[in-house]
Amino acid sequence: MNSNDETTKSLEEIIKEYELKISENTSNGEEIVLEYAKMLFSFISKELDGIEFKKIISELKKLDDKYKNKEIGLRYAISLFGFTLKQKNKGDYEETLPLLKELDTKYCSQEIGLWYANTLYNYTFKDINEKEYKEILSSLKELDEKHDYQEIGLWYAESLFGFSLKQKNKGDYEETLSLLKELNKKYDYNEITYLYLKKLIVSNKKSEEIEKILEYNINNEDILNKFLEIALNEEDFELLLQMLKKFRKKIITKKYHFFKYLTTDEIQDEKKQIILKIFKEIQTIMKILSVKKEDFEKLEKIGHYTNIEVIPYVIIKKITDEYSPDDTKGRLLLSNANYMNDPSEGKILLEYLNTMDSSFSSLFYRNEFEVSSVYLSSFTTAIDNLPMWSQYGDNGKGCCIVFNKNYFDKPKEVHDITDNLKENESVRQDECVLYRICYIDDKNNKYKFQKEDEDIKKSLENIYGNFKIINDENVEKIVMVYLEQIRYLFKSSDYKYEKEYRILKNVPINSKKIIVKKDIKPIPKLYVNIESKFNQISEVILGPKVDFPDYISPYIKYCDEKIEIRKSKAIRKHHFIEYPSHYEHIDGRGMGFYSRIPDQEYNFSRRLILLALAYAYLGAIENISNRLSECICCQSDDIEKLRQLYIEATKFKAVFLFHQPVLMKNISLIETWKYLDKVFDINSASDELLEQLSSVHYILNLDDDKKRKNIEDLKIKRQEKWNMLFTMLGIFIGLIELFK
């Protein structure tokens, strides 16, 4: 029997089957029992009701009691922990905890002790009194001393911190702080240090102890990051400034050098605190917009539209040779924000801030020729999408690279897009934090946020409120530097269909990391590279206008044979047309119109009128063609009617301008008519009809001329006969007169 067969069986069937196996096999009974325990444990991951879960726990307890096997005991402990997570009843914990304690005592195992400690910690979130909480802390302390294991120490520290939030007695508080300090010293474990730091900051006490922690963790970016996060969240700006002054560039600004403005003595502390308040709100916005692990689970695919030429930069074959150069690594190109195709890119945030108070509008003014220090790359969940191919996929001649979700990194507690690495350092992979775009409805100069972004709106209002207080040109410039971190994360809701996400990097204009692509005309462009991860690309979709796709696939498969390659299914090549601002698709079912410019409904209406005009022209041409057929078939001798029909068709084409029925200044409409003419062959059909009319008219004219000539010839012959007759008669009369 294979495992696939077993997984399809019910729990009751498995229990009966293995009970029989155990009774029949005495020689290798322990192996079968362990196999049985593993099979019971596998059911935990399935959707079970309370009765089934209790049945599994009961069976595992029987096996543990009888065989006293550590592996069985561990699975029993995990099952007990899982059972408590599914239950809301406090009594289930009271039944489960003694069983876990019994297992911990029996096996004295760190792994079992850890599940017991985790369950104790979860119990603290139930409706328990102070006495019960202290009993839990006592049990956790006992476990910590027994196993001397940092993960158990963490659950003890978490429980201590939670208990401290409920304490009102100063003595109890000091005791809890002392225990956290001991745990931090004992394990030197980041997670415990975080809790100890937070307790110190929340209490606004022991600043000298905080100094010691920061000094000790001078090279620990995680600790520094956490300190900044806690200090900002608790709005303990006085403490933060104190630490900044204490360490200057030695610690805090080693990584987060945007705090350099706060280490100077030229700015008053009151204004520094306002700057920190603004910075806190910016961090809040970035935290909301950052894509977290749980957010990725909701995304199906995330891709990047680009040119075909970019593929060799992003997709590189992994070289296992230890002597291979670093430039064999894949690269993701980030382009300067000045090159974005939307003229309002990065401006909508500043425009929104301007609307809050017109008297302060000049403070947020940005020179349109000012060079942005932000470099970015865009991603989207709109995979193989018509408008996206037109705007970002090299007008259908490019590709869409689909990334695995683990290509991107989890966001930090404190967000920093600033380039602060040494010139000989490469941009590290942990800089690839993904942010979603916040779309703002900006119709009629009224700005409206989506419901899920109301917290962002509040933060922006707080930014503006604090900004008004500053009244210092130098400080205002500092705030604008901070705003640079987020202003490219806002776009008009007209672009919501793009479903856009971005990676951002802030790089000074004088940085040696900037790459100048001189082969781009007329002016070279600026880019920044981010190291790409291997084996993190799942699919490459080639655009609808890509020629020779079979030339592209060998290289991709050579680099990574797991990458799927396909052609776009969104649109066919002959349906695709390029426009400076839009493209449209026309077939027998109607017209589709896509534009990158807002408020294009009117232009779409004009194109529908042109489409109706095209059908009207075709109808008129068909009518004249039918009348020509009738004239030839039924009235072949009526050349006058045919002549009138020819004149009518010629006048119709001349009056209604088949070739170009729109004004020369309406360039986009001219392009639309050209495409309509190409699709429906209006001018060709008209020219063909006139040619048919002309040919038939010529043929009938020839027949008519021949008939007239024949009649004239007959008349001449008749006249010649009469002339001859009269001549002969005259001669005869003359002869008679002569003989008289």
Image (cartoon, rainbow, N blue to C red):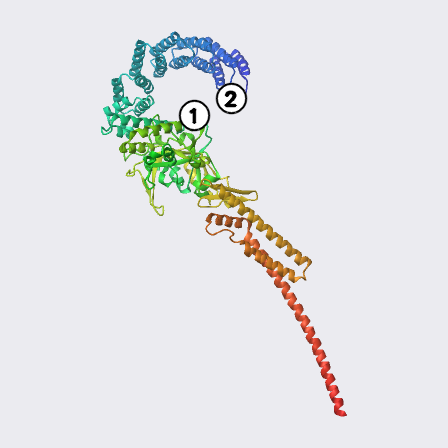
The Cα–Cα distance between marks 1 and 2, rounded to whole angstroms, is: 31 Å
Q: Quadrant of the C terminus?
A: bottom right
Q: Residues within 10 Å of mark 2 (few under 14, many from 20)?
A: few
In this view, the residue farthest toward the front is 359
Residue 296: x and y in percent read 43, 28
What SS does tag 2 mark? helix
Query: Which one is nearer the viewer's eye here, 483 or 414?
Result: 483
Q: Is residue 68 above or below residue 579?
A: above
**Quadrant of residue 449 in the image?**
top left
Give residue 587's quadrant in the image: top right
Q: Is residue 286 visible?
A: no
Percent coordinates x, y for residue 145 in the rendering: 33, 11
The foreground one among 88 and 725 is 725
Residue 617 x/y as whole percent: 57, 51
Q: Indicate whether 403 appears above or below 118.
A: below
For disc 1, the neighbor class at 10 Å (few under 14, some 14 to 19, many from 20) is few
Q: Is residue 590 visible?
A: yes
Q: Sequence order check: which comes first, mark 1 or mark 2? A: 2
- Which residue ends up furthest to the top in the rendered image? 131
Is 275 left, or right, of 630 in this rendering? left
Q: Is residue 581 left or right of residue 519?
A: right
* Mark 1: amino acid: Glu
**Helix, strand or loop at disc 1?**
helix
CB atoms of marks 1 and 2 within 8 Å: no
Residue identifier under label 2:
3
Q: Picture coordinates of residue 331 (x, y %)?
A: 36, 37
Q: Nearer the viewer, mark 1 or mark 2?
A: 1
- Name the foreground residue: 608 vs 240: 608
Q: Amino acid at mark 2?
A: Ser
Residue ID for mark 1:
294
Q: Is residue 239 above or below residue 136?
A: below
